[in-house]
Image (cartoon, rainbow, N blue to C red):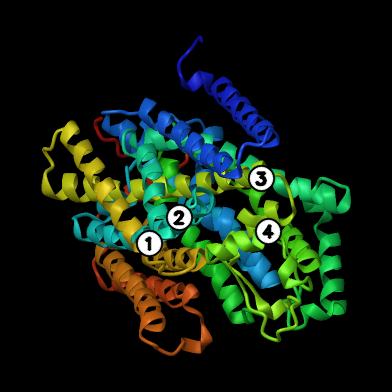
């Protein structure tokens, strides 16, 4: 093969995609030959993890710039794919369609918030942080505001939001592994942990980047194939996004005419689970949180130039759009199948998938009126399993269910890798190297980073094994913490030269503190909700107070030096070289 690795990326990933499709076809043949479903599930889980591990090991490095920012050589197209995989976590792949299934119209708040956040990333933050040239978000805070105090507060916020987020991903990995490996959830989270670690530990950002590109290919194929088949089976047209409206109409007709669906909320009726205030508050917190998440912003540090950072945001949006545009259709097709073939059926003759998911506690049947017929109120489905179970719900071959599991696993692993790397990099680079031992050798820094990565991963798995909350709730909390703690200081740090160190510290402490206080108080100590705002939108209070504190304190303290103000001006000029480079 001529040329280096970067120039052959198209060929390499083309062969990889063909190989993956061949692997799926091979498993489909094995299924037809009578190979047990459990073996098919094991092959899917272990083969895909082995491939990711192989990429991670082949990408191992002992160079600091390769470990932290993949050598800043990732082309925009591939950074877009890696960012999409980094972004589309278990929450997007597994829980978003489940949330739309459970909440109907109101679930669109997640789609709108997460998609809209990328506009803020592209316009307000990503290109400017890339021009700055930092390795981590706290690195930017330390250089922009001087000293280690602002950096330390940034690390605290980063750790809080990223750790909450990663627990949600490990819950997703555990849910999939327990279903397809037939093991308990508490053990499954640690099995998934092995997959997460082998992808990120050896090669840092370089390994995570090329693994995430591979994971995006798996997850998007896995997400689209079942719903395309389902659309073809149900409507005769294999384009679920186009047939979404027809299925919504059929669901509405069932809700109005099928007696067993009494009590079901109308799928297309707005504000049935969220009132307007909570609906729009959630959209705001998710948008602003998207633009503040350190593991997402880190991805734009890996492109060769500022211009490429902007391009990669565009590619990211396209790749994310493919899944987000499909999620509402996924939820609608799943609901139509359940409303048609499960609700109203005789309980003794329910499909086999109901028993499978009942055995692992994700589906509950309670014949309250003892008539032997399943009513809507008697069926409880954990929304997190809607995507995983849809192929079985629709009676598709088991190989399709395994494919979806592989996709969900890829989504959860890719985000967990990015989050772990963000935490470990902040601890090893910003605390150990910047504050404790600035003379540490490259080898020593990377060893410290890897040890911290393992420690954080084990801690996350231990917390996840206690099931502290649903995936969507955990992820929403993480977004609110990031939005309130980092967004005001990042935006004002780039766009307002008058923003001072004292103002930045006050803004982060007030915004993050308000949000954390509200979240913990309402979740664990019975504190009443302020204005009825749910704690998944806790950032609604922290974001404005963070901005106010930053602005007021900045105006009360001496302005930054002329040199720093000129430096900030130069960040906003798209052309030119990276301003802050560190030796490799």
Q: Nearer the viewer, mark 2 or mark 3?
A: 3
Among numbered discs 1 and 3, the one appearing first in the sequence:
3
Secondary structure at numbered mark 2: helix
**Mark 3: few/some/many CA within 10 Å (<14, 14-19, 20+):** many
Foreground residue among 27 and 263: 27
Residue 313 at what x, y percent from top left? 55, 44
Q: Label 3 to label 4, Cα distance in Å?
A: 12 Å
Q: Quadrant of residue 381?
A: bottom right
Q: Which residue is mark 3?
A: 398
Sequence-wise, the earlier of marks 4 and 1 is: 4
Instruction: State the residue position of label 1.
Output: 465
Q: Earlier in the sequence, mark 3 or mark 4?
A: 4
Do the residues bearing badges 1 and 2 touch, measured as CB atoms within 8 Å? yes
- Tell which circle, 1 or 2, labels the residue nearer the N-terminal end: 2
> How far across and down, in percent of the image, does residue 17 sit?
60, 29
* Residue 577 visible in the displayed image: no
Residue, disc 2: 174
Q: Nearer the viewer, mark 4 or mark 1?
A: 4
* Image x and y of residue 447, in percent: 20, 37
Mark 2 or 4: in front is 4
Question: Disc number at residue 199?
Answer: none
Residue drawn at x 44%, y 90% is: 528
Q: Nearer the viewer, mark 3 or mark 4?
A: 4
Badge 1 local density, few (<14 within 10 Å), some, or many (20+)?
some
Q: Which residue is mark 4?
A: 352
Give me the residue at 16% from left, 36% from top.
Answer: 444
Q: Above or below — where is 129 with respect to 53?
A: below
| Number of marks present in the image shown | 4
Q: Quarter-wise, where is residue 478 in the image?
A: bottom left
């Amino acid at each position: 093969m001529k040329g280096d690795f970067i120039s052959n990326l198209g060929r390499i990933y083309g062969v990889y995609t063909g190989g993956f499709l061949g692997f799926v076809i091979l498993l489909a043949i094995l299924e037809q030959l009578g190979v047990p479903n459990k073996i098919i599930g094991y092959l899917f889980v272990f083969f895909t993890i082995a491939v990711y591990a192989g990429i991670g090991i082949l990408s191992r490095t002992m160079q600091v710039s390769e470990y932290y920012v993949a050598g800043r050589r990732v082309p925009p197209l591939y950074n877009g794919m890696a960012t999409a995989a980094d972004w589309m976590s278990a929450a997007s792949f597994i829980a978003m369609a489940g949330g739309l299934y459970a909440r109907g119209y109101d679930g669109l708040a997640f789609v709108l918030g997460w998609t809209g956040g990328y506009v803020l990333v592209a316009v307000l933050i990503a290109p400017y942080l890339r021009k700055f040239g930092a390795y981590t978000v706290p690195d930017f805070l330390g250089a922009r505001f001087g000293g280690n105090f602002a950096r330390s507060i940034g690390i605290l916020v980063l750790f809080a939001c990223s750790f909450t987020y990663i627990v949600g991903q490990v819950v997703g990995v555990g849910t999939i592994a327990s279903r397809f490996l037939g093991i308990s959830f508490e053990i499954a989270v640690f099995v998934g942990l092995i997959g997460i670690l082998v992808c990120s530990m050896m090669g840092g950002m370089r390994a995570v980047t090329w693994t995430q590109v591979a994971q995006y290919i798996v997850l998007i194929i896995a997400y689209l194939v079942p719903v395309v088949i389902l659309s073809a089976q149900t409507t005769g047209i294999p384009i679920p996004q186009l047939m979404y409206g027809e299925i919504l109409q059929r669901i509405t007709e069932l809700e109005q005419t099928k007696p067993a669906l009494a009590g079901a909320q109308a799928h297309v009726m707005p504000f049935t689970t969220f009132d307007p205030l909570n609906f729009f508050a959630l959209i705001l917190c998710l948008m602003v949180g998207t633009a503040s998440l350190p593991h997402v912003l880190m991805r734009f540090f890996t492109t060769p130039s500022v211009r490429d950072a902007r391009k990669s945001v565009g590619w990211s949006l396209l790749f994310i759009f493919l899944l987000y545009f499909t999620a509402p259709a996924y939820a609608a097709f799943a609901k139509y199948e359940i409303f048609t073939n499960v609700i109203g059926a005789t309980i003794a003759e329910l499909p086999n998938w109901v028993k499978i998911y009942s055995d692992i506690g994700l589906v509950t049947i309670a014949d309250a009126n003892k008539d032997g017929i399943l009513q809507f109120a008697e069926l409880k489905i954990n929304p997190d399993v809607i995507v995983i179970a849809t192929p079985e719900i629709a009676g598709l071959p088991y190989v399709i269910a395994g494919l979806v599991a592989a996709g969900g696993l890829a989504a959860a692993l890719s985000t967990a890798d990015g989050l772990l790397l963000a935490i470990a990099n902040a601890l090893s680079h910003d605390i150990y190297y910047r504050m404790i031992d600035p003379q540490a050798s490259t080898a020593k820094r990377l060893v410290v980073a890897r040890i911290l990565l393992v420690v954080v991963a084990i801690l996350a798995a231990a917390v996840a094994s206690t099931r502290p909350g649903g995936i969507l709730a955990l992820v929403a909390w993480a977004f609110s913490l990031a939005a309130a703690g980092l967004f005001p200081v990042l935006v004002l740090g780039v766009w307002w030269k008058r923003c001072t160190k004292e103002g930045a510290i006050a803004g982060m402490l007030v915004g993050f503190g308000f949000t954390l206080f509200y979240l913990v108080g309402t979740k664990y100590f019975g504190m009443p909700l302020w204005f009825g705002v749910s704690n998944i939108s806790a950032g609604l209070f922290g974001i404005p107070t963070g901005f106010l504190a930053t602005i007021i304190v900045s105006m009360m303290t001496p302005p930054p030096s002329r040199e720093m103000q000129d430096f900030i001006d130069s960040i906003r000029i798209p052309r030119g070289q990276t301003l802050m480079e560190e030796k490799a």
